Image: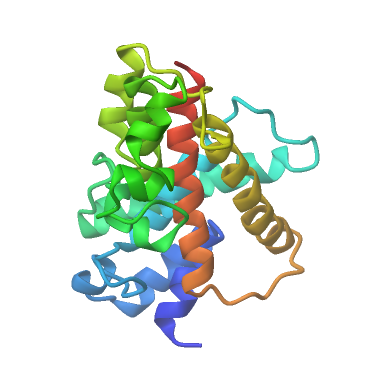
Amino acid sequence: MGIYKKLISAVFYCNADKAISLMQANNYPKQWLDNIGVFDVPFPLHYISMCAQAILSDTDDPWSADVEPIRIKMLADCRRILEFMVNEYGCDIDCEIDYQKYTDYFYAAEKDATDEDILWAPVQRVLDEGKSQLDIELYCAVERFQYDLVAQLLQAGANPRTLIEDGFAIDRIGAECAFLDTQICPLWEAYYHKNNTTTIEYEEISDLLGWAAHEKMYNLLVKS
């Protein structure tokens, strides 16, 4: 496995000692760190750590007793990696990840999807069923991962628990969070217990990115 894949894997698994050692030893070009080439749009290496940090920092739903020590160590190591990349490469970790740029790579509406595409029905038909325009707009904004618009609609009184076309916006997001948990956490746990040699590829990074995006949306909806 090349030195790039080794570093990506170390960062994904929040192995600070290995990640920092690789960066110190191999003099990676800054332009590669700014775009590791896994997607068709630029995706910096430190975004992996930022996604992991967002997930590992979320304790609204308590982690199980056997996983909690793993979470604590991984979070500390994740922060060490980010601190190193800030100090050595000038990476910007104060910015918000623009998840909308990456909706082609996780479960979300297509960027150019109309409300009708998302609803699988004309908007007027959904209105005729008694749904409010505000709730319909919220449902569609959630599917497009338009966080600012979602926040505005929630503030205006939109309800994420309104049944729209056989589904609830908050339940759809929560279900995907739970699913992506089952894809990522077993890898992290196995690595922690030294039982995992999985090489990190596109799919794992896509799942981690999607989980962080969904967690951010879920927290926005559940706290409304």
Of 207 and 71, which appears nearest the observer?
207
Residue at 74 percent of width and 43 percent of height:
67
Task: Tell which residue pokes out farthest to the bottom in this image.
Answer: 1
What colour scheme does the image use? rainbow
Residue at 24 percent of width and 53 percent of height:
91
Task: Tell which residue pokes out farthest to the right in this image.
Answer: 66
Relative height, residue 222 to residue 14 (above, below): above
Residue 82 shows up from this direction? yes
Of 117 and 101, which appears nearest the observer?
117
Q: Position of residue 142 (x, y in %)?
A: 39, 37
Horizontal side of 40 relative to 77 (left or right) equals left
Q: Position of residue 17 (x, y in %)?
A: 51, 61
The image quadrant that residue 41 belongs to is bottom left
Horizontal side of 222 relative to 116 (left or right) equals right
Relative height, residue 27 to residue 175 (above, below): below
Q: Position of residue 165 (x, y in %)?
A: 52, 37
Of 33 and 151, which appears nearest the observer?
151
Relative height, residue 192 to residue 136 (above, below): below
Q: Position of residue 175 (x, y in %)?
A: 62, 42
Residue at 21 percent of width and 69 percent of height:
30
The image quadrant that residue 23 belongs to is bottom left
Residue 78 shows up from this direction? no
Of 193 and 20, which appears nearest the observer?
193
Residue at 69 percent of width and 28 percent of height:
62
The image shows a total of numbered marks equal to: 0
Which quarter shows the C terminus?
top left
Relative height, residue 160 to residue 110 (above, below): above
